[in-house]
Amino acid sequence: MLMDVLLAATAIGCAAMGGVFFAFSFFVMRALARLPPAQGVAAMQSINVVAITPVFMTALFGTAAACVAVAASALIEWRGLVSVYLLGGSLSYVIGTILVTMVCNVPLNNALAGMSPASGDAASFWLKYVRQWTAWNHVRTASGLVAAALLLTAASLNS
């Protein structure tokens, strides 16, 4: 019973984070890219500051912790195909969402944070930033949604 609740919460967390990243990939970043560079940079700098809240960080990293618990359970109590799906979903989220965030998106955010929005450097960096940040965000979107699908598949096979 406890594992069922953990699995459901983990799948919901993966789907929710995939949805947040989906929104950024398919309309937030497109809207920001349409602004003059100084406005786009300033808006994204503001987003990056207000995103660091206990609620968002708990959703992002709490889901990762839940994925680790699900993966550990799958390895400890091997259930064949169900465990394969549990591991696949957990790894999809931890690698494709958390690792990509830390290695790709956060360094871009940090570089953007140090720039004056009106500077020429910010304007030229902004074009690169939007392209690279969004490409990596597509990875985060897909990995969160794939993780949710794999975890839900495991839950359906397990019932």
Image (tube, rainbow, N blue to C red):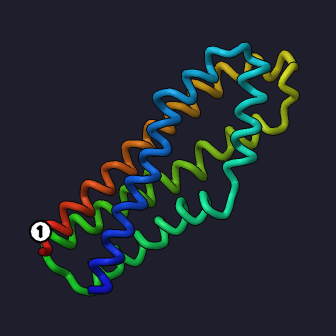
Q: Is residue 33 left or right of residue 75?
A: right
Count of numbered circles on the image: 1
**Which residue does the image show at 34% across and 62% down from the upper left?**
11
Residue, x 46% and y 52% (percent of image)? 17
Q: Quadrant of residue 125?
A: top right
Q: Residue at x 38, y 53 (%)?
A: 15
Q: Secondary structure at mark 1?
A: helix
Position of 82 compared to 19: left or right?
Answer: left
Q: Amino acid at mark 1?
A: Leu
Mark 1 is surrounded, within 10 Å at the Cα level, by few (under 14), some (14 to 19) or many (20 or more) other residues, namely few
**Residue 3 % position (x, y):** 30, 82
> In the image, what residue occupies the spot 70% across and 40% down?
47
Q: Which corner quadrant of the image does residue 74 belong to?
A: bottom left
Q: Work out which quarter of the rendered image holds the C terminus and state it.
A: bottom left
Q: Where's residue 89, x and y in %?
A: 31, 60
Camera-side residue of 42 and 122: 42
* Coordinates of residue 140 in the picture (x, y in percent): 46, 45
* Quadrant the N terminus occupies: bottom left
Label 1 sits on residue = 157
Classify residue 2 by image quadrant: bottom left
Q: Position of residue 39 (x, y in %)?
A: 76, 21
